[in-house]
Image (cartoon, rainbow, N blue to C red):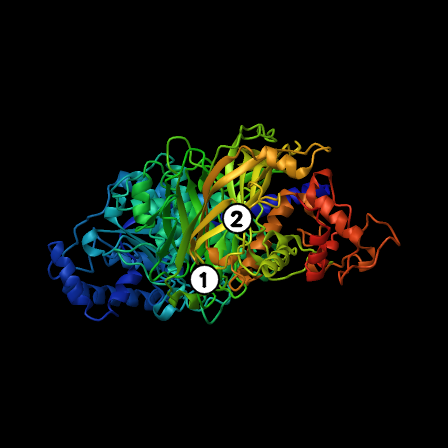
Amino acid sequence: MNWTPALRVLLLLLLALSGRAAAFTPTQYQIYCGFPFYDVTQWQLTPNWVSRWNALGARTGVPDLGTQLSGGLQKAGTVRQAVSNTVASTLIGNEATQQYYDAWYSAPVLRQLTALGIADPDFGLSTAAGVAQQSVPNDCLSAERRRMLEGFAAQAMAAYQKLGFTSPGGKNLGPVVQGGSQRAVRLYVLPPELYEGAANTSGRCQQGGKIQRQNLSFVKINANELRGTDAKAFYIIAHELFHVVQAAQGLETRPGLDRCDLMHHWMHEGMADALALHVTRTRFPNYRPSLTDDIGLNFYGLRSMSLSLPQPHTPTASDLRNYRASSFWRHLAERYHGGQYAFYAQYLDLPETNAGRDDWLNHADILVSRDAAVTIAPEQRQASRNGLYLTLPDFYTEYATWGTEKFSAVGDAAWMKEAFAPCQTVTLDARTNRSQTLTFADMQPFSARCVRVKVTGLQVGQRFSVVPMTGPLGNGLADELHLGRARSSGLKAFNCYQDFSVKRLGQTLHPGCLFKPFTGADSGVRVWQAEADEPAPGRSPEYLWVLSWVPADASDRQLTRRASPTLVLGLDVTTLNSALPPSPPAPSTTGAPVRKRTVGTVNLDPPDGAQEVLPLRGAEQTGLTGDLNLSKLAFGVQDLGVSALNRAAQDATDGDLYALGVSLADVSFGPVSFGGLSAVQENFESDGDFLGISPERAINFGQTGTFRAWVLGGNNQRSESSMTRLYITPPGPDGLPGPGLTLNVTQFDRAALVVEFSGAVCSVPWPPPPTRPLAEHLAAACARTYPVSGTIVKPHAFVYSRAQALTVGDTPGTRLYRQDLQAFLGAALPGLNGLPGGPTGAGSGAAGPPPAAAGAGSGPGSRLPGTGGCALSDRQLLEFLAYSDDPSEGPPPFDLSVLGTLSSPACVQRLMELQPQEP
């Protein structure tokens, strides 16, 4: 036959597929009431086995069962040995292998044993002739029930075959017996009186963990487990059969796995339960057991996450949390693989990577790190490590929502009681109790705790944020803590289960649910980027957060550690009571309604931004001088020079707090699109009406008391509309704004800065008439004043101190977060590719323009000598000032390298000299 190349390929594919299907043979199963004969020969090797079986027999009405078995087994063994010797069948000594069963069914052996009254290769319960003088009661199952269960077994194995697992066919599938004209895999069902436990699969793993690769997998199930609902029976069988499948995968069959009994049960049993529950849900999609059902917690994968997920210990009857680690393996499949479980064939095909030391947590980290659907950062995939560092905290956070989202019939209260109890609850009151410290005592690594945050005392429409930060921690612990938001009930609602993933460019991306962290350069503290919020109509905001401890180094040696980290929650909130007539709101860029919202600032903090960031110093002060790294900038570990400007101002005023600001900003809540991604968030349309507050003298950290201050501000700040009103405190004798505002600093310590202000301001028409003297214009406008008062509250106020300012470092944990962000941006926003430090850019080592090229807007040869030691020309500095005053007109007219030099004290001073002076 003249085959075309395409037909040849098709034929090879069909042959490959049919060969893999044929490997799961036989496809018939047999439910057998009794023990494998291999088990009864092993009993005799167990101390005191006769007395133990006498006790079991007493429960079945045969008090001397052990004594009878002892004599009967000796007789049965003698008979079988005699037959084995006669026909040279090697029947005895290979009871755990298929060779034993094949030898049994050979004609000479079968004929002789049948004649001697032994009619089956195993130890049946209903016909114990030749073994015990009195038969054990047949406490098994009806023929109809057995046929149904045999069908369940076939369906489960067909499902595993379809997922692509290597076949356990041949020697390892299970005892293959002859049933009439068909061959079938035998599964053993035992009466509860003679079997302590629910089910197990044994045979291959011997004492001391040595693998007997030629041994069969013997599946034994307590009959009571198969008498309940059909779905439960299916699940029990599917779970045990997956252990049979596991034993045939590369993880166990290839060189490297030396001690099978040390494989962590959170992997071995958890993965088996995940796959068994998957095929059970497929077969019985409407099955929903209650939590009080004996398999209810297993079905939902519900366990305490306050205990380490990767527990190496063997489960006990009262603690099956290792089985219930199935929730993590289920999360990987449903969240990252579209609900498909076929990728587990690849997971289990990877041989143990830690031969000789059995580090199963590290092995799990390698599996997740190499999975491109889960770990998107190429650095982590190539290194085959750190995949769990973000994946586990995201899972813990989403897990807190399963009781209302994935399993709504369970409900939040019942779910959280099992999953995270006790969950700490904290209330922050905007009027009084603005800071709280929580301690998580005796926390285990790779575990999680939950926090419920309630915010009270807010006015309608009041803008606020809750800023979380760890207390001072040692041993690098801060860099190992993660905070996720499971649910938010403020105006900016968030639900981790619903918002975990987004669709973009035909792909599903997973921004997840973790707050963006900043870790101090000394790894002693970690702060998370909070989001501004408002109360939703009719209710106080409440948040459900999850704090998890997941080190970057995923290793079993971590599991003995314990720590009691602290979490400090501070409220950022500002109030303003003003008789000043507000300016009309700026137009909305999102189409959402624009509202006036009060925003407070300290020193150089900008008022605009949906996410609240404490004033942090970048550890790498590059100022964009030729080594711009987008991913580092996104995490604040590169300093644009702002902190140097702030420090220069602090030094110049000889204090820590030299300025305050209150904005009645134009804010909308609506969808924002960026590169095709859309999210509902707070949008600053403009800074609106702004009051800049300058104390008569700078205030130092730790100081409290009363201070005088003056105001200089205006309306329509950073908007398309021109400023029409100048806000000042009434002029003094010199005609300039006087210190007409009173500041009452009631707290300025590590926990918070609290400043109350009150006084009167003038609203001056602006610009002034060109023919009228400025002093006269101000005095006329200030004939009428407007009372203003309010409170500015900022948490974690030590960051405003020169001595204690928080310097952010590119710590190992921060690096992993920003690598993940970088990869996410590369997938979501391909236009960023190629930028320095961008998803596929040259990174921080990319060369920037030479210094002579700085000031692209000036042209060659236009560079003027620097003034007063500043390396930049006045023209360049003026270009920077002009652009910073209105950056909305497009890209800057100068090279970005200009910004690097701005952090020098000489350039800062010259900038202040060139800055247009306000009246």
Residue type of the residue flagged with mark 1: Leu
Which residue does the image show at 54% across and 62% down from the upper left?
802
Query: Residue 278's x, y, as percent?
Result: 41, 43
Towards the viewer: 711 or 355: 711
Which residue does the image show at 41% across and 36% down from the upper left?
459
Question: Dot 2 surroundings within 10 Å: few (below 14), some, or many (20 or more)?
Answer: many
Residue identified by numbered label 2: 709
Towards the viewer: 910 or 882: 910
Q: Quadrant of the C terminus?
A: top right
Residue identified by numbered label 1: 361
Residue 15 falls left or right of residue 162: right
Disc 1, disc 2: CB below 8 Å? no
First along the sequence among labels 1 and 2: 1
Query: Residue 912's x, y, as percent?
Result: 69, 53
Question: Dot 1 surroundings within 10 Å: few (below 14), some, or many (20 or more)?
Answer: many
Towards the viewer: 157 or 186: 157
Q: Give the SS element for disc 1.
A: helix
Q: Quadrant of the N terminus?
A: top right
The circle drawn on residue 519 is none
